Amino acid sequence: MTRPTLKQIILILAAVLVIAAIIYGFLPEAETVETERIVSGILQVIVEEEGQTEVEEKFIISSPVAANIRRVDLEPGDWVEEGTELVRLAPPPSGMLDARSQAEATARVKAAEATLQERQLKADHAQTVKERMERLGEKNSATPENVLQAQLEAASAIAARDAAGADLAAAQAALGAGGKTSFGATEQALRAPVSGTILAVHRKSEGTVNPGEPLLEIGDTGQLEVAVDVLSQDAVRIRPGMRVVLDQWGGSDPLEGAVKSVGQQGKLVISPLGVEEQRVTVTVNLVSPPAIWRGLGSGYRVLARFIIWEQEEVLQVPNSALFRTGEGWEVFVVEDDIAMRRRVTVGQQTGLHSQVLEGLSQGEIVIIHPAAEIEDGVRVEVR
């Protein structure tokens, strides 16, 4: 058999290259994709909301009656001991009388004086009659009924006289107290019910206050808790004792907390975007030692992360690799530069990753953000 010449070998190689180039030209181009490797690690399902610190037991000092208060010298942040005087109260000033009111008050005083004088005369006469009838009764010159009648008339006349005296006193008070205050011996002090810090001073200047009007707030800032308003659909997953991480409070490290209570009454809140939201207040206890969060006060902002579910060494897939089909969740796995469609079963889901229960193994590579051009069996090129 004759061996092929060098020229023939060159022609054969050239033909093979031409045929390969033609075949390669007809092959579809590889799609450029982004990928991520399946790994195991800690996975947390969290609910994240902003909250603010509050004193566990806050006392609002208010005026029990309408009164006039002295100027309050205390400032927010001042520490006071139990029993310390906080506010001094005095009876409020009477209203000023104009000329017409003054004349009317004067006339009422005069009328009350005349009525009292008249009833005093009637009382004196009734007393005289009563005494005479009692003497006659002792001598059996008057019947018991006549004596009793005289006694009743005397008692009635005395009561009418006393009522007239009270009316005169009231008329004189209305006339004489116009524009006058009652500062002095009747002043009373409101004192601190507990030892604590002044949290707020609602009324500092001297003046008249109404019953129940808040004047001061006092509480122990060493006993703080955090109030967080969460969406009602998240509140149903939160339980007392659940771990909470408190961040962005101003310190270098997050604080540890635990759920104290979950409110049972929701409230309608309008979000900054104008969306109506039903929210529930969750109260969180601070678990970290007080020495760590000593700088915190009442009304400070914190970011609360409620740990709904947490587990270490969890096989997880990026949520950006998952896509929904009629039968569940699927991903594209890269095998020898080929995209292979595969069904997976997921468990707990977070904002970025999901727990893999079935369908994937550690170390496998999945396509994230798969484009519409990616199909089962398509050649891919990793970006």
Image (spheres, rainbow, N blue to C red):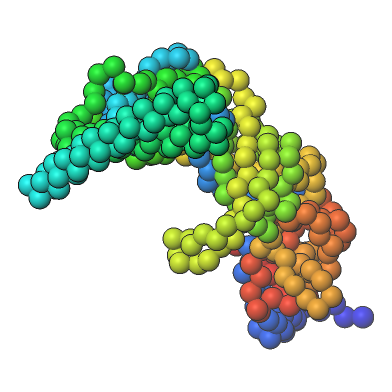
Q: Quadrant of residue 188?
A: top left
Along the line of sight, the residue nearer the viewer: 335 or 38: 38
Figure quadrant of the N terminus? bottom right
What residue appears at the point 56 percent right and 32 percent down from the top-left corner? 144
- List x then y, in percent, for residue 43: 73, 45
Along the line of sight, the residue nearer the viewer: 208 or 303: 208
What residue appears at the point 68 percent right and 81 percent down from the top-left corner? 28
Q: Quadrant of residue 260?
A: top right
In the image, residue 40 above or below residue 284: below
Left or right of 240 on screen, residue 287: left
In the image, residue 137 above or below residue 100: above
In the image, residue 339 above or below residue 160: below
| Residue lying furthest left | 99
Figure quadrant of the C terminus? bottom right
Q: How many marks?
A: 0
What residue appears at the point 39 percent right and 31 percent down from the top-left corner? 129
- List x then y, in percent, for residue 238: 71, 47
Does the rendering let one see residue 15?
Answer: no
Along the line of sight, the residue nearer the viewer: 6 or 174: 174
Left or right of 263 on screen, residue 69: left
In the image, residue 2 above or below residue 316: below
Q: Quadrant of residue 123?
A: top left
What residue appears at the point 55 percent right and 29 percent down from the top-left corner? 57
Left or right of 374 on screen, residue 79: left
Does the rendering let one see residue 172?
Answer: yes
- List x then y, in percent, for residue 128: 36, 27
- List x then y, in percent, for residue 245: 62, 37
Along the line of sight, the residue nearer the viewer: 269 or 152: 152
